[in-house]
Amino acid sequence: MDMIANWLGNTPDFAVPFALAALGLILTERAGVLSLGAEGLMLVGALAGIGAQLTYGTPGISLFLAMVAAAVVSLLFALMVLVLRINQVIAGLALVFFCQGLTGLLGTLLDWTNKPVKGLDAVELWPLSELPLMGKVFVQNPLVFMTPLIVLAVVAFLARSTTGLRMRAVGENPQAADAAGISVMGYRLAAILAGSALIGLAGGYISVLSTKLWIADMTGGRGWIAVALVIFARWSPWKALAGALLFGCIEALIPQLAAAGVRLPQYFVLMTPYAVTLAVMIWVASGKQVSGNQPGALGIPFIREERR
């Protein structure tokens, strides 16, 4: 029972980075920009967050600077896909490799590797924290409790606000949006910056609040899983949150099995999240509405002089 309680209590901590990264990708892709650079942007956010935490010691500032750093680096991606019209798949992959090399180099040069920091103290939601078995779920750092509110804000923005509806119009039919006087390039740039900031927050969460230190490539492929999670969720923020909890459960279970004395081969443990990702993708592909909510112009560059 203790193992189950610890497993459930640790699940939200593992799920939050997936949820935040998936939200960032949904924001970007709803504007028609295919973003595969989540892994790299998470690394940038993680490095910036740990650097700020070592410098200032304030988690709020550290997470904010993690968002800013990821948004600034995403300007390179915006230049490639919006101005130079480079293939968005290639641009996203190039961004990942660039960020992996950049963060590894800076982390070593600035001597930020393997230096522990103090994160945020856990907050209890009483009386829910006193529930048997489930009580530890309601003893988390504040960002865990804020994540559903962030999801709600993104849902309200996309579905209720004029700006969000215009952004979705840009992602569905940029030519029609342009004819209606909407700045396609402006909205796509804003979507890239806002989405990248959320992805950077996911990286900052990992380094500042979860592991509380920096090591090279510490995101461990979570950005790629977030890309698959967006497809699994069919670009729905609430479904992305549910999928994040699913992957969080899987990741949280592995250390609990090890603590319980269950011997598992090292490489089997490492491949488990990706095996589940492949299974989920196969299940999604077997459905009848694989791309039911996919933005109509996703991955298609906008050239104002060309009308379809």
Image: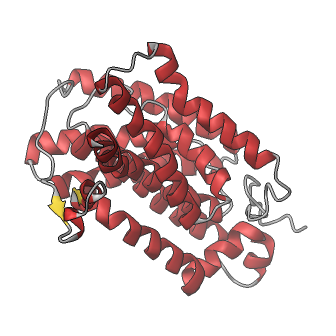
Q: Quadrant of residue 258?
A: top left
Q: How many numbered discs, if any?
A: 0
Q: Quadrant of residue 237?
A: bottom right
The colour scheme of the drawn protein is secondary structure
Vertical side of 123 occupied by 206: above or below: above
In this picture, residue 102 sits left or right of residue 211: right
Vertical side of 302 occupied by 55: above or below: above
| In-front residue for pair 272/213 | 272
What residue is shown at x 52% (from left), y 18% (from top)?
Answer: 268
Vertical side of 131 occupied by 245: above or below: above
What residue is shown at x 66% (from left), y 47% (from top)?
Answer: 84
| In-front residue for pair 64/106 | 64
In this picture, residue 97 sits left or right of residue 119: right
Q: Residue 98, how many percent across, how many down?
A: 48, 30
Q: Residue 254, how many percent across, how many down?
A: 40, 30
Q: Residue 154, how many percent across, how many down?
A: 49, 72
Quarter of the figure that contains the C terminus = bottom right
Whether residue 72 appears in this view of the structure is no
What residue is shown at x 17% (from left), y 24% (from top)?
Answer: 111
Quarter of the figure that contains the N terminus = top left
Q: Residue 93, how many percent across, how many down?
A: 60, 34
Vertical side of 274 occupied by 13: above or below: below
Residue, far right: 308
| In-front residue for pair 35/176 | 35
Whether residue 220 appears in this view of the structure is yes
Q: Quadrant of residue 50?
A: top left
